[in-house]
Image (spheres, coloured by chain):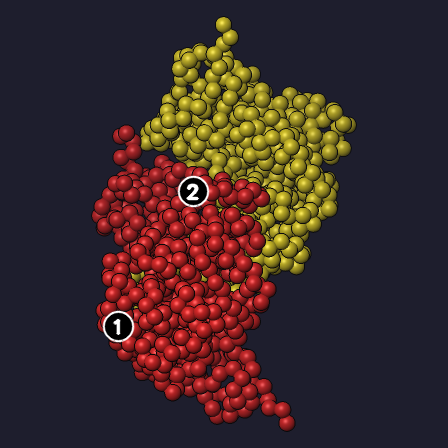
Chain colours: A red, B yellow
Amino acid sequence: MPIRSVLELRVRRLGIDTHQQPVAFMPRDCHVCRSEGFSALSRIELVKGTRRVIATLMVVDGRWIAGGEVGLSESACRLLGAQEGESVAVRHPAPVESMSAVRGKIYGSALSREALTAIVNDIDAGRFSDVELAAFLTGCTGNQLSLTEIRYLTEAMVETGERLHWDRSPVLDKHCVGGLPGNRTTPIVVAIVAANGLCIPKTSSRAITSPAGTADTMETLAPVALDLPAMRKVVEQENGCVVWGAAVQLSPTDDVMIRVERALDLDSQGQLVASVLSKKLAAGASHVLIDIPVGATAKVRDLPAAIKLQTLLVEVGGRLGLNVKVHVSNGDGPVGRGIGPALEACDVLAVLRGDAQAPPDLRERTLDLAGLLLEMAGKAPTDSGYALAATTLASGSAWRKFQAIANAQGGLREPPQARYRHPVLAGREGRVCRIDNRVLSRIGKLAGAPAAPAAGLVLGTALGERVEADQPLYTVHAESPGELAYALEYAQQHPELFFIEEDAP
Amino acid sequence: MPIRSVLELRVRRLGIDTHQQPVAFMPRDCHVCRSEGFSALSRIELVKGTRRVIATLMVVDGRWIAGGEVGLSESACRLLGAQEGESVAVRHPAPVESMSAVRGKIYGSALSREALTAIVNDIDAGRFSDVELAAFLTGCTGNQLSLTEIRYLTEAMVETGERLHWDRSPVLDKHCVGGLPGNRTTPIVVAIVAANGLCIPKTSSRAITSPAGTADTMETLAPVALDLPAMRKVVEQENGCVVWGAAVQLSPTDDVMIRVERALDLDSQGQLVASVLSKKLAAGASHVLIDIPVGATAKVRDLPAAIKLQTLLVEVGGRLGLNVKVHVSNGDGPVGRGIGPALEACDVLAVLRGDAQAPPDLRERTLDLAGLLLEMAGKAPTDSGYALAATTLASGSAWRKFQAIANAQGGLREPPQARYRHPVLAGREGRVCRIDNRVLSRIGKLAGAPAAPAAGLVLGTALGERVEADQPLYTVHAESPGELAYALEYAQQHPELFFIEEDAP
């Protein structure tokens, strides 16, 4: 078709980061804009060879994109495999057929297995705009997804990514429904479980909205960006690992949906269940323990919500052949002392090494979870998993296993230390009766975490403890003076972070 | 606060058109990105003097934005009143409080008057991202808005814009619930009604997804971008006008919502009712006639849907003090012969001038609507409005009034003619029994309409007529050979546009 050839444009790589969302820039007087009737924010399809991607168009009036050129965001270049100067075709995208099922759901119809598969495939292929994703997620929020729909959604999400298979059984996994700063039990749990000869191939994520994800913390102790063969080798050798999940491409549509869901601050239990279970299924787990911290400033705010979530996780997991157990824990305050990748790693090391100064709350939470996993796997009778876990830790066997795993992943290392530190004092004496997890996370992020791995903060007290007026509540750690100042300014503006009650007279 | 001053950046105006949506570009190593923890697609607040705007951030790795600079889209510059090189402050936006009411609605709570006012004010101030708008619109789709909620939404939308007041009564208005190519009755209706001494200050829109809006068509006959005082003068002198509504800023949030709604292709009757009625209320109307064409490829597809919409329009209009009448019309095929701004204007002129060749269907529709308006205003008894309208047209009084209005708006002119034309032949003989309105509109747009005012197409036949194999079904008009070729290629790929039934033997 000779007319089609007119619509080829030369790629200009603009070095613009828009996460997964592809964006294209074309001059207003571009012949393609004219003939296709494109205008600002049109959805356009870019084609290079067999690869196709749908991008949002921004129309440029300035001179910095020439006629015959199309400027592309990094995500568009990556998805197309396009280099500077190469040719891409530009055209109207076909309508996203699965959006009609989304509209049906919004009007009250149930989503069939076929519809959910089509929707997830279209999301995976980048055919949904953020606005369409928002409509889908909104239509699925609250209690609007049935158990059956959640199951189909989970299966569809698993099918779009890699799926790991292990020739051992059981294959254990754990997950924490976020929201608690410093709650970094995973590296220790993995070490205890693996030290008992059980298989626990753990993939973890980096922080999205928190000062540290498990992958960020583990990375200050050992390499985590392993590909699938490397991960497999570690697990075969040491029974367990703690690696970064994104490198392994498990349930990739989950990351796309989570980004929009967080932007909307929508709490969809159905989406949460599909998100968690799809990752675990894709990782090849047979037995999954899920920790749900409950507290006023945690993700799950009260017990009824936790119990509803538990029911969904266990039911849907069961239908998908997963043995799911839920552990509801206290989510009133932060866990351990450090918040931020390296500072949390220090807590992890202290517990593993059995230091006298190790945070007792982190140790207890870890033993609870590890004990439950040992029981789920049949390694310990009911109610004696905790004791076995405690022995494994006290004997040094967990610490040796952790070192072996870290070395197998590329080498154990010491976490970095921040150069700039400043304590924040209590200002009055009394008892700490409330800590705001969200403000705490925010200060850690303003100090530079997780991008600056040594940044964050170290708590000088804990919930329920007495403090003196001149005692440090916490110390901010930063890698630059600017970040230190900025975190401290925010801290000053939010004295409600720590609520200190006067002692009774 | 000395730390805040670090967050000032110099504006670079990038000439990027993103409609109303503000976009900002900052280099990845920017100190503001670092200290504020901004990353790609973060929502950021830009402040200049007393103006604030929330923008979506794109992070730039290339060299084309320097440290200390922030690149802005045209919309961001416009809303901030910012010029190249000026200083703006950048910071985290406060959370959009009214989104919590949106979340409540999604979970099933009703929206209060206060909540809807807050939501519409936040949309008006540009505080909602497209993703948040999508969630709001999705939560309101289908039957999810009650009559009371629609009323509050309508009132809130009116309050955000200008509101016209006329010291006459009644003040008439009309609206067509889109979807029919060529259905350009408004200029003729206004002329007939105004010629009968009634006040009809008509504001119209430009095309968004169609080949022509009423404002586009009228603009080929007279200037339409009048400001409020100029519009008022025309109406005082001639009783009526046909001007472009955007210049007058009536219910401006409507345009913001419509853009996202169309992207989602969501049909929300509640939103539609609020959209139509808010524009009419803001225009100061007391009596409104609404035309709902019903057909398989029109916006409203069947009679039950039309009746439901009618009930909502009349009920909500009544509560808001508007006298609303609905006219359900046939929406099976296009109206008149021309599709595209100038080609539709030619049909309008033919009807007004009483040409023998004037399209009879456009004439009939116009007389139906004008007659109903004359009856609503008490100018004609029930069932005799049509006759009065026909007399006004036949006597030349409507044509004289139209010329007077056009001259008062700045001068009557002849519509332009396209240089490139090509007929599309029937290919077989038989009877035209179906025409696809959507494909027809698409061809008109590909030919260049509405940006190229002379572009579009002219029908050579109509629904129900017999055609010969070599007879032109329509002729494509374009202002450039490329657009002509492109429209013809698309036409070739869509022979289903005209369904021709063989004659019975």
Q: Is residue B194 visible?
A: no
Instruction: Report the front residue among B461 and B330.
Output: B330
Which residue is located at x 44 percent, y 39 percent?
A97
Q: Does residue B344 lie above or below A95 as drawn?
A: above
Quarter of the image that includes the C terminus of chain A = bottom right
Number of numbered discs present?
2
Q: Nearer the viewer, residue B154 or A231?
A: A231
Describe residue A428's horizontal placement relative to residue A414 as left or right: right
Q: Is residue B463 left or right of residue A406?
A: right
* Residue A372 image point, x, y percent: 45, 69
Q: Which residue is mark 2?
A: A118
The quarter holding residue A279 reads: bottom left
Which residue is painted at 40% across and 17% down in the image? B425
**Chain holding disc 2:** A
Q: Which residue in the rendered view is the most extreme toward the top? A: B505
Rendered position, B168 above or below B371: below
The chain identifier of the residue carrying mark 1 reads: A
Say which residue label 1 marks: A404
Figure quadrant of the N terminus of chain A? top left
Secondary structure state at the residue bearing disc 2: helix
**Residue B342 place in picture, x, y as percent:** 47, 30
In front of the other: A189 or B250: A189
Q: Nearer the viewer, mark 1 or mark 2?
A: 1
Q: Residues within 10 Å of mark 1 (few under 14, many from 20)?
A: many
Question: Which is nearer the eye, B419 or B375?
Answer: B375
Q: Position of residue B120 (x, y in %)?
A: 59, 55
Residue A284 visible to an observer of this rendering: yes
Instruction: Classify A267 as above or below A219.
Output: above
> Compared to B63, does B409 lie above or below?
above
**What's the residue at 26%, 72% (across, down)?**
A404
Task: Give the alpha-carbon distance from disc 1 to disc 2, as whole Å.
Answer: 43 Å
- Residue type indicated by callout 1: Ala
